Image: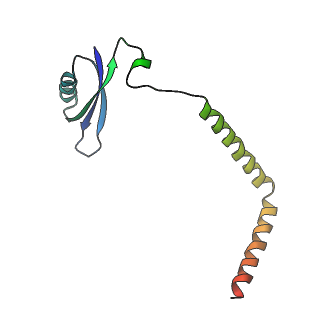
Amino acid sequence: MSDYEVLLRRDNGMNKTVIIEDCMSEQEAAETAEAMYGMEVLRVLWLGNRNQSNSSSSVSYSSGSSGDIGGIFGALVGLFLLVLIVQFWKIALVIGIIVLVLCVIGAGDD
């Protein structure tokens, strides 16, 4: 038996995707989805056989740890910048006012 992903057309324009399990063919999956949900079938995709492992299926999900390290590093950098802003906001405010005054004086010279 195989699993199929069926895309159905809704009346409001937002399509719906459902998984139909234990079907012998795409036609059976389409008919089952249409009967269950009462919507027009737009597409049927074969996901694989049930008795096969997920690694040999046409749909695979990977969970690597390389993205986790970058996310943790980014969070630490963001936290560090937040602490700097909280601790030194007075200095940043004075520097900002000085830069603003210099910009206004420089714009007045034109």
Picture residue at 31% right of the left edge, 33% below the top: 17
* Place of residue 102 in the rendered image (x, y in percent of width and height, measured from the top left): 76, 78
In the visual, does 2 lie left or right of 100?
left
Q: Residue furthest top?
A: 51
Q: Is residue 55 above or below residue 43?
A: above
Please name whichever residue, 77 or 70, is drawn nearer the observer in this view of the structure. 70
Q: Is residue 83 above or below residue 101?
A: above
The image's colour scheme reads rainbow
Picture residue at 18% right of the left edge, 24% below the top: 27
In the visual, does 67 lie left or right of 50?
right
Picture residue at 80% right of the left edge, 62% below the top: 90
* Place of residue 74 in the rendered image (x, y in percent of width and height, measured from the top left): 67, 42
Please name whichever residue, 1 or 87, is drawn nearer the observer in this view of the structure. 1
Picture residue at 73% right of the left edge, 74% below the top: 100
Q: Quadrant of residue 31?
A: top left
Please name whichever residue, 56 or 10, is drawn nearer the observer in this view of the structure. 56
